[in-house]
Amino acid sequence: MSKRRKALLGKFIYTLVLLAFMAALSYVAYTWLERVNDYAEQYELSRPSKAVDSYLETLNRDRWNDGMARAVQAMPHEAQSDEEIKAFVQSKLADGVTAVRRSGLSDAGSQSYSLRCGNREIGSMTIVEDQSYQGKVNLDEQPWILVKKLLPGILEWGLKPWVVARDEFDFTNLYNSVEITVPSTYSVFINGTELGEEYIVASGIHYDVYEPYYNDLPILPTKVTYRFDNAIGNVQPQIRDEDGNEVQIDPTQGDIQFVKPVDGETQARLMNLMQPFTEKYLIFRSGATDSMTALNNLKPYIIPGSDIDKRAQNALDGLSWAHTSSFKMTDYKFNGILPLANGVYVCSVTATTETYTYGKGEVTDIMELSVICYDDGQTTLAFQVN
């Protein structure tokens, strides 16, 4: 073989060796680059903030997750649906949720965070290292098996991504108490759910307009107070009277708004009674005429044996010593009727009188009378004056 051919063959072999070396070097470079990229990815995932930021991004986008659903399901809300509570919670989270590391509450391989909306804690979350995580490079394949044998430990970086292990929420601070006082015959509803007797926290409450009459008439209607503690958000109660009609309570009116107005026929009978009764009663009380005659004139307008009758009988002797020589009712006004119970009514009247009394002369008085009357549709009579 000539020297020239030997030289060419040597160059060819050198070139093949060089190409093989370069190919091997490229393979090693590519393999290690793949491992480096895997390391970079693992390093990125191994930062706790990566898992926390990802969790918050999803939470603030949806403003809802399974942990919130579990919290709502565990809360008593018998008058509101899960969907209503969800909508209310989402509205409260419009400003966004943040996470604050809770120091002293984290174990090795885990970190705990407080979840906050505004300045209020609404829950917590815990992240842990994912021990089952496998990188993209399979270290059980060549050449990594050989590398592990030659350089043990060099490939084990111990980088694990963080994942959310659990989250918990507490929405009990969203509870509001609904408390309302209504007549005992009324019904109270929250979102269409009627409140039963178990929600009554006070009973036997007097009407303000009936306060002077409870001792004599304990059967007068009373009020009760309902309290509902499981309302979430601004829940307005619905009130219905004994006939099922919806009622709006005006806090400026007092309890007179719960009193049904007197029908026209009853009102007419009571008004027809009150003017002659008032005049006959005031004449008798003045002592300006013969007391027995005055009492007999009064009796057609009062119930026999009533409080008025008894007091008039007791006053007969005293009235005989009265110094009033004349009496005249110069003005009369019927002010209104307050129905009590079982056909009993309070009639309010105002009378202006002129009397002449020995030693005092002529006297003008304006008198306010509250007269308790009985009316059953057939008989209309008075039995007490206050």
Image (tube, rainbow, N blue to C red):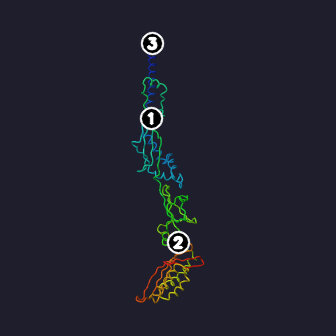
Please name which of the two marks, 3 or 1, marks the residue nearer to the observer: 1
Q: Looking at the image, which residue is at 45% across and 47% down?
A: 123
Q: Tag 3: Cα neighbours inside 10 Å, few (<14), some, or many (≥20)?
A: few
Q: Looking at the image, which residue is at 45% across and 12% down?
A: 6
Q: Which residue is mark 3?
A: 6
The circle drawn on residue 307 is none
Above or below, comparing residue 170 to residue 29 in the picture: below
| 310 horizontally vs 156: left or right | right
Q: CA distance from mark 3 to mark 2?
A: 137 Å
Residue 194 position by quadrant: bottom right
Residue 296: x and y in percent read 54, 86
Residue 151: x and y in percent read 42, 24
Q: Looking at the image, which residue is at 47% across and 42% down?
A: 166
Residue at disc 2, secondary structure? loop
Count of numbered circles in the view: 3
Residue 169: x and y in percent read 47, 47
Residue at disc 3, secondary structure? helix
Residue that sits furthest to the left in the current view: 103
- Asked whether 172 or 45 is in front, the reply is 172
**Amino acid type indicated by mark 2:** Leu
Which badge, 3 or 2, comes first in the chain's sequence? 3
The circle drawn on residue 217 is 2
- Asked whether 61 or 131 is in front, the reply is 131
Q: CA distance from mark 3 to mark 1?
A: 58 Å
- Asked whether 257 or 31 is in front, the reply is 257
**Amino acid type indicated by mark 1:** Lys
Residue at disc 1, secondary structure? loop
**Amino acid type indicated by mark 3:** Lys
Residue 173: x and y in percent read 45, 52
Q: Which residue is mark 1?
A: 160
